[in-house]
Amino acid sequence: MTETATHEPQTKDRHYVNRRGAELLKEQKSARGRRQRRTEERLREASQARLVRARFTKHRLATASLILLVAMYAIAVFADFVAPYDKLQRFEDAQYTAPTRVHLMDQQGNWHRPFIYETRNELNPDTFQYEQRVPDGAQRYPIKLLVKTKPYKLVGVVPLEHRLFGTEGRPVFLLGSDHLGRDLFSRLIHASRVSLLIGLGGVALSFVLGVTLGGISGYFGGLTDSVIQRLIDFLISIPLIPLWMALSAAIPQGWSGIQTYFAITLILSLVGWTGLARVVRGKVMSLRDEDYVTAARISSAGHLSIIRRHLLPGVTSFLVVHITLAIPGMILGETTLSFLGLGISAPDVSWGTLLQQAQDVTVVANYPWLLAPAAFLVLAVVLFNFVGDGLRDAADPYSR
């Protein structure tokens, strides 16, 4: 009798737990279903741009790449503030200095804020190369934020007297120095402004040319199409490197860095629009016989209005993806020209001009940190490709 009475409460408790668990699971499923239904309703009423954005955010790698790209461009725009030194500032007895080691613990084992030690270049008898060594009792130089420096103008407009970080009394070379004792990290940050922004300018011009000429060629056809396509065939048949060399040689030697910058942007745009024009032409030719285009013609709409308002929106997803994939090509083109000595020249800097010092194998073997601009170049191109892949998947209506 006692055992039966003991088992009955346990059975009731078990049934209650199971019933309560089933109720909670049902409520959770119903709440999840309601959220899914609300999301589906919002997506059904959302615009194409919102749908693309919602699908793009699900691509984690592309989203992270976009965040890193935005950070890179922000650093490039505010290079004067982020870089600890000016791009032309030299330090005596600091030629080909190896990257400075940043310490958190001193020689006695005590923890400190990030700092650097005073170092000396000593000859290694085994390798016959000079190496940095920290002498006993060396002075510590803490790395500080918002260090006061000589007055300068941020973006050429805002006067400032502080930089993001630095040390007082001894320079810090995060990526080493070059043959003239200039901080490579500071020069790389300043060079990113030219190398990254020239891609935007070049793509903008080539985008306008490609979309305009490709749309006109595909819509009108006939003689207009033949003339534009033969022009594209002629430009594609020209070897790219000799064409760049010929156009760059036409730039006067006395031009300033800004003038050379815009000249290179124009050169890259003149040879970079042909592929986009071909694809836009094919897309427009496949859409120009659709019913809504015929209705627009019957309603007496102008040719340019039909192209701009009815045909080009049909290739918007491709155009967005093309922009993200064309910018790396423009960046590589500028780097190639500057590396060959045909683009940006001193005193202005770009990633290509910084890589000129790495042409000698002996120099690279002894001072490998001079290849740092190549790493940043590869990183930028890879990030753009990841973003382009994410946009392509998000804009493709047939992808899942």
Image (cartoon, rainbow, N blue to C red):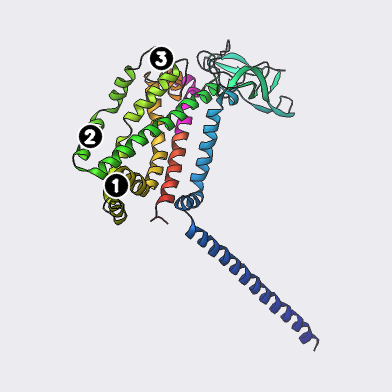
The residue nearer to you, when weighing 242 against 220, is 220
Vertical comparison of 166 with 69: above or below: above
Disc 2 marks a residue whose amino acid type is: Asp
Q: Would you say residue 287 sits in the magenta stretch?
A: no
- Measuring from the top left, give residue 297's x and y in whole percent: 28, 51
**Magenta stretch secondary structure, dominant:** helix
Disc 3 marks a residue whose amino acid type is: Trp
Residue 233, numbered circle:
2
Disc 1 marks a residue whose amino acid type is: Val
User: Residue 13 occupies which quadrant of the picture?
Assistant: bottom right
Label 3 element class: loop
For marks 2 and 3, give the CA distance.
32 Å
Closer to viewer: mark 2 or mark 1: 1
Q: Which residues are magenta?
A: 364-378
Label 1 element class: helix
Residue 251, numbered circle:
none
Q: Is residue 143 visible?
A: no
Task: Specify whether 8 is left or right of 119.
Answer: right
For marks 2 and 1, give the CA distance.
19 Å
**On the image, numbered disc 3 is attached to which residue?**
255
Task: Specify whether 280 is left or right of 41.
Answer: left
User: Residue 167 occupies which quadrant of the picture?
Assistant: top right
**On the image, numbered disc 1 is attached to which residue?**
284
- Quick one: which residue is furthest to the top in this view? 92
The residue nearer to you, when weighing 250 against 111, is 250
- Measuring from the top left, give residue 76's x and y in whole percent: 53, 28
- Measuring from the top left, give residue 384's x and y in whole percent: 45, 38
The residue nearer to you, when weighing 318 against 368, is 318
Q: Residues within 10 Å of mark 3 (few under 14, many from 20)?
A: few
Vertical comparison of 386 with 26: above or below: above
User: Looking at the image, is mark 3 or mark 1 earlier in the sequence?
Assistant: 3
Q: Would you say residue 375 sits in the magenta stretch?
A: yes
